[in-house]
Image (cartoon, grey):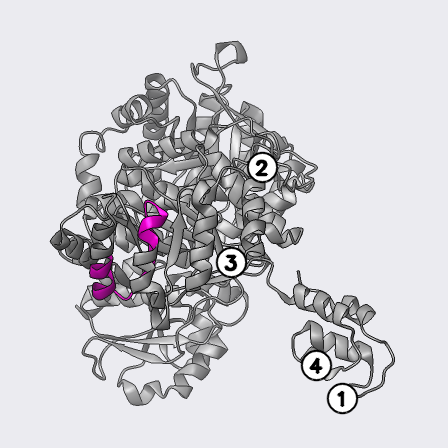
């Protein structure tokens, strides 16, 4: 039934639509490709604007696992966490994740300082074993990332992957590679709308098309500053829909890595008896962090626990029903 | 909707008679807009104008009270769609549906489980507000018997969910003084519910299919003298629920649509606990005033309470702790000294990590007006000068015999300058608090 009572916002711009992955006809080898963004309203308000794409979940895969994982998470991922290729294959096929986010943190001088060729071989093997697009993250050490990521970009030319992150202080090297090789890029800003916009302008100035940029607003976990990114995303989305094309990019939120750092996601039942089942508490920490980000306008969530992925995927599917 | 000073000025006599104590009608109007003075000070405004001003001073979304005394819970009276525009005022009340077809001992256990859902996070107590008793027995004696257990066992706010009007009166007879929220599940019985709620002066929640139905029903209730209402939004699809919750908020705040200006309620009926909790998370951020859950397990409730705490924090006023030197553990004059900011989240995170290191330490919280380390550094609230001054102000040289100060890794760049200004030996700590246990343990070796 049609309601007489309604108040529609008069938005003037759509979020840029970003294509993830390229199939054989477009110069890549992906069997599954996705679009993100493209919406002209706040999340799930179908009566107000177009929402052509649902938020995607990217399963986090790491080339080396931190030793501070809680028991539940460690046990649940034990069968794959030592083999990133199998991990990626399994998450892409069984967990319901839409795509894979490979973080090459073992490149970091403090975390193993793996050689470039290892990373390149890993990316190649992962791509062979999954049908979906891939997100590739560096290790956070600017020098090492600038050495490795452009090489991977070139080796995967035409696949239309998503590379990250670039920041205001270090964007040229990776951006130039992604422009040349036809990839998308993640632009990271420290919970700040102005810096997000400025970085998009810088990227645009060196030739990165606006529909190949995804914003990482740097979220905090539930209980650890989640509300800052929540509001930054809503502010940026309002500005974008009202016409600011330099902020009208989809968002990627690193839910898994943040939520599993939270004390409440880690602490055992013995140390926190009133907190209930520790394994499920950790999973729900990730789920609730993800749900808040989805409502704030996230377009890609990177997530870690397979069960959290299933729960959030199901909630997104429900929200996408009209 | 609030009127501006100029809007009010146009309604005043504009004679500048000064009898209100102000030099001009405009000055008086400006104070009225700020609610700093009462309209009675002007004896020349007409009854008509008075009515307009009174209506405008009503909140766009009615504030409804459930419960009494210390456990009183306030819902509604929100003023914005987005928390960054101002803030969200009344945290979503969280309650639990308990059905009356269980043995009294089971009910007592269930209530105990709910009472235990109280936690402390970043210095604030967070807990739950409501117990909703739903009649499933179709037996009004059973309903009232169980209600008696609830009344005696808990001080939480009560939501009465009778199966029919028959059970409502005896229930209100014994608990109207607790100001319960009454829930009407059956639109055909709405008029009877309205008249009983009016008689016992308690708020009424009801469901409707569409915004038009909510609007018509609330107009009818108001006509009959029942103004404390709550809308139960219950569409079949999640996106339609979100649409209605968003439209109720938007139309009442931006269009002053009085017939929709009421708090809202969502009930999680899904038996799948994780799925239900995920739905509840969506309702807490957008835009339910009350969420009723079935699960009482802390692993589902704690994340929801934490989310509510986050979203209802005032974005202009970050939570702060008192600026001072906090002794952590059994400190003495040889214990290490750390400095951080007085942003609550920073303080409690650092505190937790020092505690888990089991190395007693003095923790200085510098007054950064509640900013985190990097923000405060960028805003020049966490500078070598301010840290040096604080060391003197809190007489650190009397508290410890050494002169070693540990600073956060993120501000390593200030260590030379700080060493010079303070005369203390600066040790650069880890960037993240999580690195403190190993840092402190290595230090004490």
> x%, y% of residue A46?
56, 32
Q: Earlier in the sequence, mark 4 or mark 1?
A: 1
Q: Which mark is residue A14?
A: none
Label 2: how many residues lie within 10 Å, few (<14), some (14-19) or many (20+)? Answer: many
Q: Earlier in the sequence, mark 3 or mark 1?
A: 1
Given the image, what chain letter belongs to the residue carrying mark 3?
Answer: B
Q: Are marks 3 and 1 on the same chain?
A: yes
Q: Which residue is mark 1?
A: B21
Q: Earlier in the sequence, mark 4 or mark 3?
A: 4
The secondary structure type at the circle numbered 4 is helix
Q: Is residue B426 magenta?
A: no
Q: Specify the quadrant that holds the N terminus of chain B.
A: bottom right
Q: Which mark is residue A249?
A: 2
The secondary structure type at the circle numbered 1 is loop
Give the foreground label among 2 and 4: 4
Label 1: how many residues lie within 10 Å, few (<14), some (14-19) or many (20+)? Answer: few
Q: Which residues are magenta?
A: B147-168
Q: Which mark is residue B226?
A: 3
Give the foreground label among 3 and 1: 3
User: Whole-Å distance between the Cαs marked 3 and 1?
Assistant: 39 Å
In the displayed orientation, state which residue is furthest to the right.
B15
Give the foreground label among 1 and 2: 1
Give the foreground label among 4 and 1: 4
Q: Which residue is mark 4?
A: B40
User: Whole-Å distance between the Cαs marked 3 and 2?
Assistant: 47 Å
Q: Are marks 4 and 1 on the same chain?
A: yes
User: Whole-Å distance between the Cαs marked 1 and 2?
Assistant: 55 Å
The secondary structure type at the circle numbered 3 is loop
């Amino acid at each position: 039934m049609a309601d007489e009572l309604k108040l529609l916002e008069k938005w003037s711009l759509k979020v840029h639509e970003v294509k993830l992955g390229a199939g054989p006809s477009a110069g890549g080898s992906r069997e599954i490709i996705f679009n993100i963004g493209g919406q002209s309203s706040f999340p799930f308000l179908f009566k107000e604007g177009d929402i052509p794409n649902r938020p995607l979940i990217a399963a986090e895969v790491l080339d080396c696992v931190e030793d501070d994982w809680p028991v539940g998470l460690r046990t649940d991922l034990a069968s794959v966490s030592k083999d990133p290729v199998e991990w990626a294959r399994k998450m892409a096929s069984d967990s319901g994740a839409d795509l894979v986010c490979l973080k090459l943190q073992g490149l970091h001088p403090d975390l193993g300082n793996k050689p470039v060729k290892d990373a390149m071989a890993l990316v190649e093997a992962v791509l062979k074993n999954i049908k979906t697009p891939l997100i590739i993250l560096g290790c956070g050490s600017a020098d090492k990332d600038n050495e490795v990521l452009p090489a991977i970009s070139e080796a995967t030319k035409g696949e239309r992957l998503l590379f990250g992150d670039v920041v205001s202080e270090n964007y040229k090297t990776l951006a130039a590679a992604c422009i040349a090789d036809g990839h998308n890029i993640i632009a990271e800003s420290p919970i700040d709308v102005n810096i997000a916009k400025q970085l998009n302008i810088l990227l645009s100035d060196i030739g990165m098309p606006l529909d190949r940029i995804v914003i990482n607003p740097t979220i905090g976990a539930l209980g650890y500053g989640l509300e800052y990114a929540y509001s930054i995303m809503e502010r940026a989305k309002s500005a974008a829909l009202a016409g600011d094309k330099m902020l009208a990019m989809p968002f990627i939120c690193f839910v898994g890595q943040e939520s599993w750092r939270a004390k409440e996601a880690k602490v055992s039942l013995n140390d926190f008896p009133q907190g209930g089942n520790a394994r499920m508490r950790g999973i729900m920490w990730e789920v609730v962090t993800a749900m808040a980000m989805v409502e704030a306008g996230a377009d890609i969530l990177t997530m870690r626990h397979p069960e959290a992925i299933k729960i959030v995927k199901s909630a997104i599917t429900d929200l996408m029903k009209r | 909707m609030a009127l501006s000073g100029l809007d009010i000025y146009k309604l005043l006599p504009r004679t500048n008679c000064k009898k209100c104590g102000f030099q001009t009608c405009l000055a008086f109007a400006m104070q009225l807009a700020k609610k700093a003075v009462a309209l009675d000070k002007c004896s020349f405004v007409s009854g008509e104008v008075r009515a307009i001003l009174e209506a405008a001073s009503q909140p766009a979304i009615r504030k409804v009270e459930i419960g009494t005394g210390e456990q009183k819970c306030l819902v509604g009276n929100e003023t914005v769609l987005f928390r960054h525009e101002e803030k969200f005022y009344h945290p979503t009340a969280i309650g639990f549906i308990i059905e009356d077809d269980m043995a009294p001992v089971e009910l007592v256990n269930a209530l105990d489980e709910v009472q235990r859902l109280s936690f402390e996070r970043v210095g604030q107590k967070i807990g739950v507000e409501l117990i909703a008793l739903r009649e499933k027995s179709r037996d009004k004696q059973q309903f009232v018997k169980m209600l008696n257990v609830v009344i005696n066992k808990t001080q939480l706010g009560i939501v009465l969910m009778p199966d029919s009007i028959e059970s409502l009166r005896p229930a209100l007879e014994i608990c109207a003084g607790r100001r319960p929220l009454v829930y009407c599940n059956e639109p055909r019985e709405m008029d009877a519910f309205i008249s009983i709620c009016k008689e016992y002066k308690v708020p009424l929640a009801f469901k409707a299919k569409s915004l038009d139905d909510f609007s018509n029903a609330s107009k009818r209730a108001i006509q009959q003298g029942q103004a404390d209402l709550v809308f139960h939004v219950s569409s079949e699809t999640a996106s339609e629920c979100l649409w209605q919750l968003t439209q109720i908020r938007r139309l009442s705040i931006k269009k002053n649509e009085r017939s929709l200006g009421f708090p809202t309620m969502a009930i999680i009926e899904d038996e799948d606990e994780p799925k239900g909790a995920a739905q509840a998370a969506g309702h807490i951020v957008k835009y339910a005033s009350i969420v009723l859950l079935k699960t009482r397990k802390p692993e589902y409730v704690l994340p929801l309470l934490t989310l509510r705490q986050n979203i209802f924090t005032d974005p202009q006023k970050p939570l702060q702790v008192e600026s001072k030197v906090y002794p952590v553990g059994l400190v003495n004059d040889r214990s290490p000294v750390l400095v951080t900011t007085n942003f609550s989240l920073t303080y409690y995170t650092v505190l937790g990590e020092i505690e888990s290191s089991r190395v007693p330490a003095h923790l200085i919280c510098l007054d950064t007006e509640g900013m985190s380390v990097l923000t405060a550094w960028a805003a020049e609230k966490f500078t070598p000068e301010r840290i040096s001054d604080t060391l003197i102000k809190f007489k650190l040289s009397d508290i410890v015999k050494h002169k070693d100060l540990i600073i956060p890794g993120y501000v390593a760049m200030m260590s030379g300058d700080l060493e010079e200004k303070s005369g203390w030996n600066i040790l650069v700590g880890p960037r993240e608090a999580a690195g403190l246990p190993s840092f402190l343990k290595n230090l004490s070796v």
